[in-house]
Amino acid sequence: MALRGVDFKWFDGFFLSMLATSVIIVSINWKRYRLCAHPLHIWIVVDYMTVFVFRLLMFVDNGLAAGMGLDLGWQQRYARFRGRIVVLSILLLLLYPFLWFWTVIGTLWFASARSCLPEEGQKWGFLIWLLFSYCGLICIACVSVAKWLARRQAHLLRAQQGIPLSEYGVLVDMIRVPDWAFEAAAGQEMRGAGQDTAYHPGLYLTPTQREAVEALIQELPKFRLKTVPTDCSECPICLEEFHVGNEVRGLPCAHNFHVDCIDQWLRLNVKCPRCRCSVFPNLDLSALTNLHTEPERAAVVPIPAPTAVTVPRPPSIRVELPPLASGVAPPRPPGGSHCPLP
């Protein structure tokens, strides 16, 4: 069973308790390690304690990331964002490089002084821990690079929609948007990949259709805030707080946004960025799916199949000739006169 938000599982407790127990055992046998030329006992204690603190800070980061998904105010969300920056800076800029350096040092010390360990079983335990440390450090690097590439790929897709791409923006997005929220959004995009024109019609509209959508956007009501609402004190798009006098635009779902933010959003999307309700329910989006095929169809000129031409045959003429050397006279034509033969 996992603690909510922190993602603390039973094997994490077992692992941390094993580290604490190992530190206690080494402390009890502290004097027996003095025979070694290198202080392996100090290396073990420092390495175990560093891994212990590293794992605890990972739990703290998971808790801060889980809290960023709640519908909190801008100040609380920004405080959690700064907390994640501090925790991740300690993990990635301080503890992770130190663990690499300390593991290499431990490998060199163990190679030159493994014969001085108090018991034979401790040699294998030390060697297994070194292998475990290398595997863990490599896995952390691979997972971090994979997450970076996934976020960068998502930003590359956004760059095709006109949103600028920057490595700093990818880094900020990894801290501001937790992994679980990014994976949920990516899953929705994969499920709706076949309906891309329905969610992003602005990518496929013709100039005439863009003007029609722009007219619908401008018909949405906009007003200046006289008081800041307590239930929605910030713009969900830019995450900046509303102030008295700000010009906001209201959607049919009763959600308000900065005019510039929501106008740019609606030029590419047709759903509210907060509740995903349709902003233009009367807009016919089914015709947009044929925007790619209609020009192709118009460019193809059908060529009729050749038809067979039948040439009429001339009528056959049958001529009957009288028989030769016969005593029978040929028949007389109708209406003709009869002339006796000489």
Image: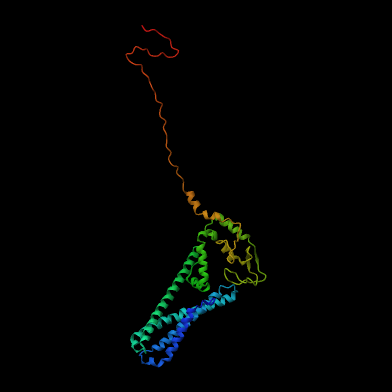
Image side of residue 55 versus residue 40, left or right: right
Q: Position of residue 179 (x, y in %)?
A: 50, 72
Q: Position of residue 192 (x, y in %)?
A: 52, 61
> In front here: 251 or 313?
313
Figure check: 203 above or below 324 = below
Residue 85 visible, this angle = no
* Residue 23 falls in image quadrant: bottom left
* Residue 43 falls in image quadrant: bottom left
Q: In percent of the image, x 38 and y 84: which residue is there? A: 125
Q: How many marks?
A: 0
* Residue 205 falls in image quadrant: bottom right
Q: Position of residue 243 (x, y in %)?
A: 63, 72
Question: Coloured how?
Answer: rainbow
> In front here: 194 or 245?
194
Q: Position of residue 177 (x, y in %)?
A: 52, 72
Q: Identify the residue at the far top of this view.
A: 342
Image side of residue 246 versus residue 197, left or right: right
Q: Identify the residue at the far bottom of this view.
A: 31
Residue 111 visible, this angle = yes
Q: In percent of the image, x 51 and y 62: which residue is there? A: 191
Figure check: 154 above or below 135 = above
Figure check: 233 above or below 30 = above
Q: Identify the residue at the far right of this view.
A: 226
The quadrant in which the C terminus is found is top left
Q: Identify the residue at the far left of this view.
A: 325
